[in-house]
Structures are given as C-alpha cells and as structure tokens.
Amino acid sequence: MMLVVFALVLWAAGWALNVRLASGPAADTGTAQLAVPALFGLTLIVMWELIVRGLEVPGVILPPPSAIGFAFAGQWDVIWADFVQTFVKGALSGYVIGALAAFAVAILADRFDFLKRGLLPVGNFMAALPIVGTAPILVMWFGFDWQSKAAVVVVMVFFPILVNTVAGLADTAAMQRDLMRTYGASYTQTLLKLRIPAALPFIFNGLKISTTLALIGAIVAEFFGSPTLGMGFRISTSVGQLALDMVWAEIVAAALAGSAFYGIIAVIEKRVTFWHPSHRG
Amino acid sequence: MTDAPLSAPQAGVGRSGRVALRLRAVSGTVIPVLAVIAALVGLWYLACIPMNAQQSVLLAERGGAEVSPATASERRDVGGIALSLRNPDPALALAFGQDRPVLPAPHQVAAELWGSTVGLRVTSKRSLVFHGWITLSATLAGFAVGTGLGILLAVGIVHSRVMDMSVMPWAIVSQTIPIIAIAPMIIVVLYSIGVQGLVPKAVISAYLSFFPVVVGMVKGLRSPDAMQLDLLRTYGASGAQTFWRLRLPASLPYLFASLKIGVAASLIGAIVGELPTGAVRGLGARLLAGSYYGQTVQIWSALFAAAILAALLVAIISGVERVLLRRMGLMR
C-alpha cells in the first residue's frame, strides 16, 4: 500500500511541477515545451511501476514497465528479426509500391477530367472502408510470407495517397497556370515545374497518414497467418502464452517504428516544402 | 449538356436554375462515378478468368474435356493467364460459378450477400445481419464512449495550459502508433479477469476513436479567432458563456470531420477485436472462419457487409452534419 500512496504523492508532485513550469515565465521556451510532456510521461510510467508493484498485480494482467524494459533488452534479437520481417519487408515495400501506384493513377486521373470526377468520389469512399478486412483474401492469394503483408499495405495506403495527390494537383491558381501558358510551357513542364511542387504539401499529408496505416496493415495481416516471425505473429502468440511483457515489448517496438517512420516523412517534408507557409518563419 | 454558367443570360429560361444545377451535378459526377464503378466490376470479372483458371481447367478435365497440359502437376507451373489462353473455352465457361473460387465473381458475392441478409432469419447463425449487429453494437458502444471521453479531454486541454502542454504532444504522437497492435492483449487480459463479449471489443473501438476526436475537437475549440473572442469579451461574457455560445458551436465542423474518421476506426477496431480470440460471432469472426476453411465467397460477403456498414455509419454522420450545420448557418 505504501508504494501506491507514494505513487499518488509522486503524481501530485509531478503535476505541481508541471503547473509551475506551464504557468511560469519560461513556459514558451523550447525546453519547457519538451520538459512538460516528458515529465508527464515519466510520472505516468513511474506511477504504473509503483502501483503494479504495490497492488501486486499479476504479470499476466499488467506487467510493470521495468519487466517490459527487460524483455525488450533481453529479447532484442527476436524483436529485431520481427521488426525486419514486418516493417522492412512487409510495411515498407508495400508502402513504396502503394505510393508509386497511387501517384501514377493520380497523374492519369489529373490528365483526364472524366476519370478524375469518377475516381475521386470512389477513392474517398474506399478510404473510409475497413480495407484491413482484405487481409484474409490477400494472405490466401500471396501466401504466408511478407509478400501478402506488402499486398495488404499496398491496398491500404493506395486510396489516401491517391485522394490527396489528386486534390493537390488541382491546387494551383488560374493565375499561375496562365503564367505558365504565357511562357509557352508544355503539359509536362507545367506538371513538373508548377503543379507537382504545388501538390507536395497534399502528397506529404497522404504519405504521413499512410505511415500508420502501413504498420497497421502489416501487423493485422499477420493475424491471418504468417511465418513464425513478425510483430503481429509475436503479439498473437505471446498473448496466447500469457507472456505479456513480450507483448508490451513488441508494442513498444511498433510504437517506436511508427513514430520514427512518421518522423522521417515529416523531416523530408520540411526539407522539400520549405517554401510552404506552414514551414516558414 | 451545355456548359454555360448558370448566371449566363437566359440561363433561367426553360427550367429553373435549381433543376439545371441538379442536372449538371448528375452529368458532372454521377456518370463518371458509374463509369468508374462499371470499369472496376468489368476488371473484376476479367480477373476471375485467370485467377480461377487452375480450377476451371481441372473441372473441365474431370468432365472429360481435352485440356492442354494434360496432368495437374504440369499445370501447376503454368501461370493463370497462360493457362486460360491455352484452354479458352473451359476457362471462360467455368470461371464464374465455382464453389470455392480463388476470386469469386461479383454476382456470386452479391448472391451470397443477399442470401445471408434477406434470405435468412435474422437470428440464424449464418445471417450476416446477426453477425453485423454483434459487430455494430460493439462499434457503437465504443464509439460513444470514445467520443464522449475525447470531447471531455479536449475541453480540458483547451481550458488548462498544463493539460495542453502535458497531454497534447502525447495525443499527437499516439496518432502515429499502430494502436491496433494492443487489441489482442486487451481481449485476452479482459478475458482473464472475467470480462468478455461486447465490452473488450468496445474498449478497443473506444480507444481507436478517442484520439482523432481529441485532436479534431481541440483544433475546433481553438478555431474562433481573436476578433470573435474579443467581441465576446466586450459583451462581458463569462468563460462558460464563451464556451457555450462561441467555442462549442465553432468546433462542430471539426468535430464532425473527426467523428467520420472515428466511426470508421471504431468499426475496424471491433472487427480486429474479433480476430485474435477466435470469436464465433461478428463480421471479424466470419472473415476468420472463412479464411480457415477456404470459404472465399463467405470472406468476400463479410468484407462487403463490413464496407456497407462503414459506409452507412459515415453517411449517417454526414447527414446529421449537413442538417445541423445548415440550421446553424455554418454551411452554405
């Protein structure tokens, strides 16, 4: 019980410190912007540890963070192999193929207005559907290995990127297009020098949405069958063995992979669309 | 159809502008959309031929017909397209009516969908209405809880600087995480403490719809600009009055955008929640059972049922949004 009381005291102390930081004079500095959420997260983790130990919650219901940390460090090679199987082979290859396919179709749709008017509502509609349900079909077609996971990812990321790219390609002002016409620019020149650069913020929006979808697709597809390897496989089998510290370690790995993937795309976006108002100043 | 602007001279002659607008919308979207859908269905039928070629040729061979690579083991190395080109007659004739096709034809899926919704009693274990309701009830329960908590947290974030600085970065980071990976664990852990059935799935649904609502609602509650806030201050409005009269109404367009994302995520959560425990009821269970027993038509019909359900849920929210926002004058 002492530990639980201590956890609550710690919570109050952390919150008080955050209140002081957030309402103090230094609140708008970068350090405070980083320190406050970090402190919040840290307090939560320490509370979790103390309460789980204090109430003696069994490890098959909720393992303490330290046990998850040990599982993560101790089984690093297993987690790394799962990561390569699910993320590099499944999610990343599917993401690249899906993005390129969506991009190609978007340029086609942009060229032919009829196609655009037909494809855009259909694409918007498809983007809201539970596409992850195609996983059993694609696993049946492409086998248990990473190819089927990549196929699920292709289908999942295709529509968000398509819809965003088409919207982006339409986002030039009549004045800008007229300017290109007065320069005597051809269709290709206009596309490469004006419309694709103007579409980049939209394209990156689609790419960023799709990073999470890619991981979700790759992990859920493994619930329908996989080689004895992969994050989704490990999660579902470790749950069956009640090895919850391993499950949490895989979830931490998936979370880190997802955030890093998103972060990398966001950094590239910042580099490529430095001229956009949201990145200036 | 002419492409003259509605405001052109004599545009109102003959039929009213409203009718012309409707007609133009028909030719502007409906026809291309129908064309694209027809093309997709055509492609689907076309794809059935090579996808099902192995089995069509096998069936033809059993029926006593001459087929080009004579034995099944030789045929295994031949691709579907090559096989259907070498045996055009059986490949074409038998592609669309198999029991367990690799790719069922659209009419097979439609027939199964019709048969398992309208053709059966709702209480039957094979009725998709029954399975759909199991999934839908978990989705709706989770969506309601997730949305409610999300709105509460957003209100807290907007009114408390500490909460904003502590929680908001985590809410944003959580959007980049494949949260669905937690689903199997939630199911099993809740099962081990004696909770099963609707509640675990609803927990996953709530979790998935929670963060989109928080992020959208915070954006919405912050959308009134300084001018509008200043105006209310000159009226001497209290904090509560500012919230009810300005922030909340202004946030509704953002809320509805998030709700549409959230309800789709909730449905996915409920379906995925049915996968890891080998549930026997619900659309996810139909998908899983179909994939175990190779019942492709059943998988496809469950998939389409899920898609129709998602479309209906999003359409209902869009309808409420349109009526509500129009009455509030937020939408033209």
Image (cartoon, rainbow, N blue to C red):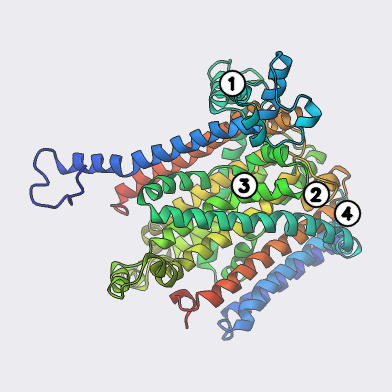
Residue A241 spot, x, y in % from top left:
89, 44
Contact? badges 4 and 2 (CB < 8 Å): no
In front of the other: A281 or B65 = B65
Type of residue at label 1? Ala
In front of the other: A153 or B238 = A153
Q: Mark 3 falls on what kind of element?
A: helix
Same-subunit check for callouts 3 and 1: yes
Position above or below: A2 against B143: below
Q: Distance between the residues labelled 4 and 1?
A: 67 Å
Can residue B148 be seen here? The reply is no
Residue A171 spot, x, y in % from top left:
38, 64
The mark found on residue A16 in the picture is none
Type of residue at label 3? Ala
Q: In which quarter of the image is the N terminus of chain B?
A: top left
Find disc 3 in the rendering and name its residue. B206
In the rendered image, which quarter is residue A142 located in? Answer: top right
Q: Nearer the viewer, mark 1 or mark 2?
A: 1
Contact? badges 4 and 1 (CB < 8 Å): no
Q: Is residue B107 left or right of residue A169?
A: right
Type of residue at label 2? Ile
Q: Nearer the viewer, mark 4 or mark 2?
A: 2
Find disc 2 in the rendering and name its residue. A235
Looking at the image, which residue sits at the far bottom? A25
The mark found on residue A56 in the picture is 4
Residue B229 spot, x, y in % from top left:
36, 70
Same-subunit check for callouts 1 and 2: no
> Label 3: how many residues lie within 10 Å, few (<14), some (14-19) or many (20+)?
many
Q: Nearer the viewer, mark 3 or mark 1?
A: 1
In primary-sequence order, the first of circles 4 and 2 is 4
